[in-house]
Amino acid sequence: MQRLMIGLGAAIAVAAVVLGAVFLSPQVGTKSASVRPTTAEAALKHPLGEMRDRKDPGEDHYIQGRYPEAIEYWIGAAAKGSAYAAHRLGVEYMDGKPGVVQRDYAKSMQYHTQAARAGIALSMFDLGSLNEFGNGVDKNMPLAARWYGHSADYGLAQGQYNYATMLESGDGVPRDDVEALKFFILAARGGFSGVPFNAQTSKIDQKAPTPAQFLEERITKEQAAEGRQRADSFRAASGPLQGE
């Protein structure tokens, strides 16, 4: 099952269904197929609020195409402790858009880490992606799972989906079907449901189960009930991230 990436837009712009692939819909409450978001900018709103502050001076520079001025402003603001500026720098250095800034994974990791520790779930998610795919660092699935897990705990639907796939497969984290179902359910409530996919025909099939439904079909009724109960009682974390 393919996980979602938010950063690294240029590297994952192709949208194709292959065996085991899952496309996600950013529309809340839908389960229909859709091209998945490819950059942090595609996830402007998430459970923690608006991540593009139109009143931010750096954002004004950016919108007007004054990219060097935007980057310079955010560097200064991040040095003074701005989590928002650190997040935006993490995104830009991760994506390396032509004419904006040269891609630099080390700087992206630095700034995303600053923002993540301050409680920005999108930066937690992107740290998961950097570690999962070995961009600028050695591939580290346990560390990727930890960062995806943090973003999931902070209520980011994208992170909840990715973390669910890892919990289901035991990839980088001990396998836990009940927790996987919990996060699949939460991700779906946030708009990230896997497309119904028939693994036998390698085609989208609206009659095929979603990842959450497929998982629920192969676990016990007691486990399924526990997963739903955990989802219902979930409360997103907030504030600075502890222990990182």
Image: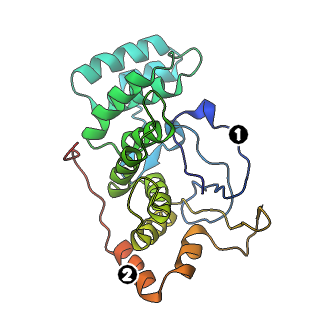
Report which quarter residue 52 is drawn in: top left
Looking at numbered disc 2 in the image, what kind of residue is underneath it? Answer: Glu
SS of the residue at dot 2? Answer: helix
Residue at left 45%, top 27%? 136
Residue position for label 1: 14
| Quarter of the rendering occupied by the C terminus | top left
Say whether residue 57 is left or right of residue 27. left
Residue 140 on image: x %, y %: 42, 41
All told, the count of numbered labels is 2
Mark 2 nearby-residue class (10 Å; few <14, some 14–19, many ≥20): some
Q: Residue 40, how many percent across, how many down?
A: 49, 38
Point 31% across, 34% down: residue? 113
Horizontal arrangement in the rendering, residue 185 relative to residue 11 (left or right)? left
Q: Disc 1 and disc 2: Cα gap in Å?
A: 37 Å
Camera-nearest residue between 125 and 39: 125
| Vertical relation: 201 (above or below) 171 | below
Whole-percent x, y for residue 242 in the image? 19, 47
Q: Which mark is residue 151?
A: none
Residue marked by disc 2: 226
The answer to whether 128 is drawn above or below residue 208 in the figure is above
How packed is label 1: few (under 14 Cα within 10 Å), some, or many (20 or more)?
few
| Colouring of the image | rainbow
Q: Is residue 83 above or below residue 48?
A: above
Residue, x 26% and y 29% (percent of image)? 82
Which residue type carries mark 1?
Val
Q: What element carries label 1?
A: loop
